[in-house]
Amino acid sequence: MIQFERFTLANGLRVIVHQDLSTPMAVVNIMYDVGARDEDPSKTGFAHLFEHLMFGGSVNIPEYDEPLQMAGGENNAYTTNDLTNYYISLPADNLETAFWLESDRMLSLAFSEKSLETQRKVVCEEFKEHYLTKPYGDVWHKMRELAYKVHPYRWMTIGKELSHIENAQLGDVKDFFFKHYRPVNAVLVVAGNVTTEKVKTLAEKWFGDIPSGEKYVRNLPQEPEQTAARKLTVEADVPLDAFYKTWHAGSRMEQRYYTTDLLTDILSGGGSSRLYQSLVKEQKLFSNIECYHFGSTENGLVAIEGKLVKGIKPEDGEKAVEAELTKLKTELVPENELQKVKNKTESMIAFEDMSVMNRANSLAYYETLGDAAWMNAELPKYANVSVEAIREEARKIFREENSNTIYYHAK
Amino acid sequence: MSIDRTTAPPIVDAVNFNLQLKPYQSYTLRNGVKVYAVDAGAEDVLQLEWVFFAGNSLEEQNLVAATANFLLRNGTSRKTAFQINEYFEYYGAYLNRACYNETASITLHCLNKHAGELLPAVKELIVDSVMPAEELAIYQQNMKQRLKVNLKKSDFVAGRLIDTYLYGEKHPYGKYSRVEDFDALQRESLLAFYQQYYVHGRLILFAAGRIPEHLFVQLDQHFGDLPNQPVEVPVAPLFPATEKKYRITNDPNGVQGSIRIARPFPNRHHPDFLKAQVLNALFGGFFGSRLMSNIREDKGYTYGIHSFLLNHIQHSGWMISTEAGKDVSEATVAEIYKEMKALREEPVDEEELLLVRNYLMGSILGDLDGPFQLIGRWKNIILNNLPESYFYDSIRTIKTITAEELQALAEKYLQEDDFYELVVF
């Protein structure tokens, strides 16, 4: 049970305080309700590029990192298709430094041309390092485009192509900032060796006078239901054939999410999982195979990917995968197998909650979804999943007309 | 009320913090096996690590140590690999194994309410693994496939090559896996290695988390009867490369170069080691370092650049590592040397030195948070055979090292000619 207190400033900034006196540290986490899904299709990669620019100085503070390091703090940030998160960990004695830095960059960035120019290059190198130079590095670009025709999940967080990042202009940066980086679109979590009283005082002092901004109302085009299987064959200079298949699944807020999470755990994620045991160990068709889901806020994907053993055709690998999925659709999973993945989930949550940083991050995430208290309601939702629900969900998801397949052939 | 946003709020300099490393408790099992434990944390979780002197320094044939370690979980005389995995996973436990240069380990993470069921199952792996031929064959095939994929990556290739320049291909720190090494593996030699270095080998145990009341009794019950025979890790001769500069083409169509620049450096017992960690932080050890500020934040040549001291027990090394755009790789190499030169020629000013001190102290304070981090620090001290005061010596060095000492250190170690230089395109 994670305890917390919550209040909202007059400008709409939601603040959550989670006290843990066993640590000498404090964590300040700000989550903005904006991700790659909110980008203009001709300017993709922008939310993430923007995250880099948040470190390029704000209106009153030319250097973000240096004063924080001077206060003994560390920080980082990440962007997903759904949201953008910034977090600081620093000695609790120096908590106010974090308020000073974060509030100034919420007030306004410096919008420096030099910072934009440098970070465009840095992000292009990041793009190359992670997606262009790695074998199979482009597959998720292709898969997203195959699976989504309308919804902005059709591009990756890093962006659709390098040119979108290379062409980013300062004007775009300003528009994006004043549209999304306003108190009313943000959640602030302060955790660790802090008191609610102190956080209230500091929040009022540093964030209280920032103009509220307009609440961003998300109105994204919804992906129509897929009615026919889609297939793509890629040839590239890679050493092994690989197989990728995805299916459309539900959204984060449905009970289906928990069923899907356990379903993917039954298929993959441990040495006794079904796909690994059957396809890697017994039939020796794949050298590795994984099943997971994207965990995205809106309707996401379930994915199965694996590299084939030399000499095995992707078609044959796929047939064997489908045979495993058919079992899930026709037979009930044994109770103890479902209990196994539930136990695993319980223990994973306990390990994740060990770190104050993770707890702060989770509180911000659930509050952004709607209510921080949902963080404490996860376990019962997993416990409620029945073997019948698993079969039902498998039937819903693993339909051929709902699928997207890529055969990645070695040249 | 209007506030002054241009002035930083007052801070407590982290350098003034009085950092304490929570002491470990230690126990000795009836066979002499030492158990080091840190009881801390709020969650009812436990981490147990069985460290054997079974690293690749002890093998006579390449990959035997790593493979024996990997196959520990793949079958005993009573359970198949599947049954072993199912057992641990049913209790929500994570069972991992890892092979290093001197040691190899088994690590268990679990909710402590399940420790009683899990300890005997770990014991079974330590005394009764059978390493089935079929499991070995699957491992060989899949590892060869993985290796082929990795060899397409310039960063992987660069990481292997720079180690061979520093230590030589025959040295445990320099040797690497080849397809023919996987092919040459024999079940018999794996079992012999397992018998010598696990069943009869030398063991140390590390425990952390909310330590259950009866843990030591249980550990003694299950692991107190192991032979625990002495193992001496041999000292291998070094064969550093004579050539210093390398340019290698791995992927002619690649868009980045993997840059590795490294020199040999003594181990943690050398009086310069702790000081060098401060100089390293200033040079390339954190986001505000010289290398990061110049090469990423000013020039945008790379997504990230880091320098670090290698985590080896016998001989360390000082390495700079980055992936940079193909057309700016040579410029990046030149900038790295420029930063070395600046550290040799100019003493660091007080403001920047205070920044580094505060950053290091703050980061240690943050890292002392949680039982797994605490036992990790003690494990490092114990396995490197360092004095118990090592942590406090390190803090004292961070607090007191002077600009002159740092400059002298740069003069001694950050000399371009002493570094191996590699770019893999």
Image (cartoon, helix red, strand yellow):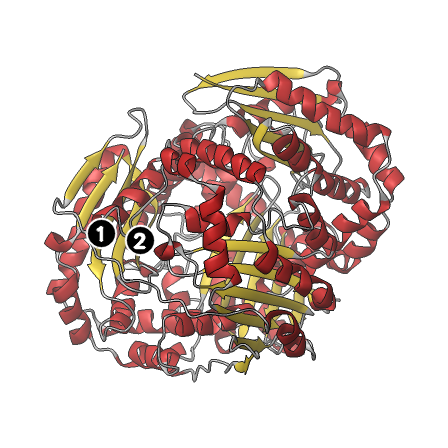
Report the amino acid beneath label 2.
Tyr
Residue in view at x 62 percent, y 35 percent: A281
Location of mark 2 (residue): B173
Location of mark 1 (residue): B166
Neighbour class for label 2 at 10 Å: few (<14), some, many (≥20)?
A: many
Image quarter for residue A57?
A: bottom left
Expressed as whole percent of the image width and height from the top left, the position of residue B181 reads 38, 38
The mark that comes first in sequence, 2 or 1, is 1
Report the amino acid beneath label 1.
Leu
Residue in view at x 45 percent, y 27 percent: A161
Residue in view at x 28 percent, y 25 percent: B252
Local secondary structure at mark 2 = loop
Q: Nearer the viewer, residue A101 or B129?
A: B129
Q: Name the chain letter of the residue that bears numbered label 1.
A: B
Answer yes or no: is residue A96 visible.
no
The disc placed on residue A334 is none
Q: Mark 2 and 1 residues: CB-CB less than 8 Å, in contact?
A: yes
Local secondary structure at mark 1 = helix
The number of callouts visible is 2
Expressed as whole percent of the image width and height from the top left, the position of residue A33 reads 62, 47
